[in-house]
Image (spheres, helix red, strand yellow):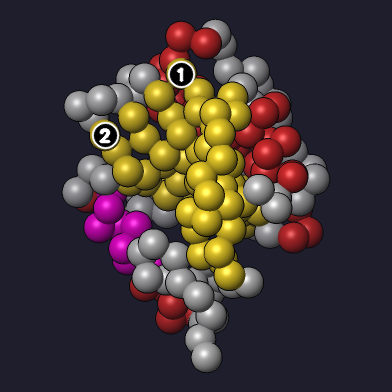
Amino acid sequence: MPPPTGAAGLSRRPSAETQVREWFAAHRRGWQREKGAHWAVTRGGGSVLGRIALRGFGFDDGVADVAYGVVPGARGTGVASGALTVLTTWALREIGFHRLELDHSTRNAASCGVATKCGYLLEGTKRSAAVHDDGRHDMHLHARVRDEGPVRAVMDGSLTGLTA
């Protein structure tokens, strides 16, 4: 039996290079349609340490969703919080979003720590809201609102555009 799939009909973990290439093509289409943006996260333009995304653009309400992931060897080094800080600052100050939402599995304490560290307040739990490789997960919902003060810089990171 194939692994469970997420809302977009894709496994959250790639099974082949062709699948990753399909994801990049979908990301490019999302950018062209002003629906979302995805970046590779690097340090100093070197190897890819993870990814971060701003998606589900709701320009009328000023709301978007944030998602991120970090390769195992870079976890716990500030990569996710650094990328989230850069993206949050840009999305709230430069693009003008009013609210950014972020959700993660309740089983992922590290991601909860990243969200909290970057000023995303925990608003609640969405029960059985996402499918992961090991089945359904409850998801914490965090949000950051523009008027909640400055975004604290966590690290000097760089974002490399996937659509360039």
Occupied quadrant, residue 162: bottom left
Instruction: Say whether residue 127 is magenta.
Output: no
Q: Is residue 74 left or right of residue 139?
A: right
Q: Which residue is mark 1?
A: 145
Tell me, for residue 12, which label it has, or none: none
- Mark 1 crowdedness (10 Å alpha carbons): few <14, some 14-19, many ≥20: some
Magenta-tinted stretch: 23-31
For badge 2, the amino acid type reads Gly
Chief SS of the magenta region: helix
For badge 1, the amino acid type reads Val
Occupied quadrant, residue 85: top right
For the point 64% across and 18% down, the residue is 152
Q: Secondary structure at mark 2?
A: strand
Task: Tell me which label, 2 or 1, sits earlier in the chain.
Answer: 2
Are the residues at dot 2 and dot 1 in contact (C-beta closer than 8 Å)? no
Instruction: Find residue 41 and report its horizontal and vertical position in percent.
Output: 58, 48
For the point 79% across and 43% down, the residue is 77
For the point 66% across and 53% down, the residue is 70
Q: Is residue 100 left or right of residue 76?
A: left
Q: Which residue is mark 2?
A: 58
